[in-house]
Amino acid sequence: MDMSGEEDCIFCKIVRGEIPASVVFEDEQCMAFMDIFPVGQGHCLLIPKEHHTNMLDVDLGLAAHLGRRLAELTRAVHKTFSPDGVLNVVANGPGAGQEVPHLHIHIIPRNHGADFGFRFPEGYRDSMAPRDELDRLAASIRKNIPR
Ligand code: 5GP
Ligand code: ZN
């Protein structure tokens, strides 16, 4: 657990009730609330109550719990707004676009043609990666997966 900055962490403050939030639900381990700057109607965030920076340091048992709650929340958001689709987005680290350093998963309803979304760069399918390179990369990641 990353204890640095927990005192000042905006999401820890929400968990402690020190600043207001529009809470969707909470249980012992996690909490979901509406994003204060929604990119679209229904944009909410799922967080662990305990302070972890992101997926790189979160306790794995807690990650499993969040996974289940994420599926439930995503279905609830879909049922509520009937969008064309729902994005689940997690930025792990500033390089990935993480601004609030407390693990959070975005749940964002999205309709066709919306002016936001996860996009690959133009032309990325121009050439397929060579199989031997993909096999080599898969093996190097596999080495770091716990058995
Ligand atoms: P990130 O860029 O770190 O993935 O996303 C952080 C998200 O937290 C942003 O979508 C931002 O709108 C949201 N956010 C930042 N401060 C607050 C806050 O005080 N309350 C709520 N509800 N959302 C916040
Ligand atoms: Zn925090």
Image (cartoon, rainbow, N blue to C red):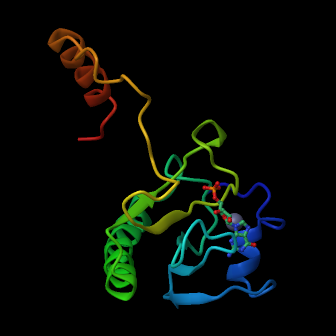
Quarter of the render that holds ligand 2 = bottom right
Which quadrant holds the N terminus? bottom right
Question: Can you give x and y, in whole percent of width and height, for residue 86 in the image?
Answer: 37, 67
> Number of callouts in the render?
0
Of residue 26 and residue 24, the one placed in the foreground of this image is 24
Residues 58 and 122: in front is 122
Is residue 76 toward the left or the right of residue 98 in the image?
A: left
Horizontal arrangement in the rendering, residue 4 relative to residue 124 (left or right): right
Q: Dividing the image into 4 quarters, which one contains the C terminus?
A: top left
- How far across and down, in percent of the image, does residue 46 sit? 51, 72
Quadrant of res 85: bottom left
The residue that appears at 24% across and 24% down in the rendered structure is: 138
In front of the other: 91 or 2? 91
**Percent x, y for residue 20?**
76, 87
Where residue 90 sits in the image (x, y, percent)? Answer: 49, 54
Position of 53 relative to 95 (above/below): below
Q: Is residue 56 above or below residue 89?
A: above
Quadrant of res 76: bottom left
Res 17 quadrant in image: bottom right
Residue at (36%, 60%) from the top-left corner?
A: 112
- Residue name at image x 53 percent, y 80 percent: 32
Q: Residue furthest front?
A: 113
Residue at 82 percent across and 67 percent down: it is 7
